[in-house]
Amino acid sequence: MAAILLSGPAVEPLTLAEAKSYLRVEHDDDDALIAALVAAVRAEVEAKTRRALITQRWRWILDAWPRDGRIALAPAPVREILAARVYDENGIAQAIDTQAFVVDTAAAPGVIGFVSWALPAPGRAVAGIEIDVACGYGDAAADVPEPLRQAMRVLLAHRYENRGLAAAADAGPASVAALLSPYRVMAL
């Protein structure tokens, strides 16, 4: 099973103004750098928690329907199924009604349930099924849990202050791990 990011978040969980305020930066010289760091720490928080903070569209590609009628998906939280299709032996996509699936929006990783015998079997052995889903807490920064936003702030300050010295493997301050711990999704 493979996942492809179709569209990333439309906004960041921290605005440039919020980031500059937290960093106590009053000039505009570092705006591009701070905006880039906000995007980077959002991606870092998402990677560490296996969660999408702001709504994103993902495509999951499967070879066959799981026999147990369940597909576990990350990043969490899965909000809705946007589209589903099965490819026939000629490589032509056949749409599947999204109402054939049940989405457990509270599960982490997200779970999509279905009745496997009621869905058409793919006609090709590899990548015969595609499911497009929306993941994330919502479309606005206010939808993101505050501990995750605070972890971003702490990481942002650490990355900004140590931008010339910090190694790529630097996990940041210990408080970040404590803020992220309740939100971590275990590997599938």
Image (cartoon, rainbow, N blue to C red):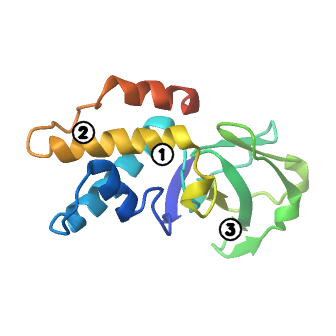
Q: Position of residue 104 (x, y in %)?
A: 79, 44
Q: Nearer the viewer, residue 56 or 181?
A: 181
Residue 178, by quadrant, is top left
Q: Is residue 92 above or below residue 144?
A: below
Callout in the foreground (3, 1): 1
Which residue is under mark 1? 149
Dot 3: few (<14), some (14–19), or many (≥20) neighbours within 10 Å?
few
**Of callouts 3 and 1, which one flags the residue occurring earlier in the amino acid sequence?**
3
User: What's the amino acid at mark 3?
Assistant: Glu
Q: 72 and 92: which one is in front?
A: 72
Residue 126 visible here: no
Q: Are marks 3 and 2 in contact (CB under 8 Å)?
A: no
Q: Residue at x 52, y 37 (%)?
A: 147
Please tell me which of labels 3 and 2 falls first in the chain.
3
Identify the element where label 1 is drawn: helix
* Numbered badge on residue 89: 3
| Mark pair 3, 2: CA separation | 52 Å
Point out which mark residue 158 bears: 2
How far is the residue under mark 1 from the one under mark 2?
Answer: 14 Å
Say which label, 1 or 2, has the lower sequence index: 1
Residue 119 disc label: none
* Residue in view at x 18 percent, y 65 percent: 27
> In this image, 47 relative to 73: left or right?
left
Q: Toward the viewer: 19 or 183?
A: 19
Tell me the kind of residue under disc 2: His
Q: Is residue 15 visible?
A: yes
Q: Name the residue rendered at 40%, 44% in the picture.
A: 152
Label 3: element kind: loop
Mark toward the viewer: 3 or 2: 2
Q: Amino acid at mark 1?
A: Arg
| Percent coordinates x, y for residue 133 in the rendering | 66, 60
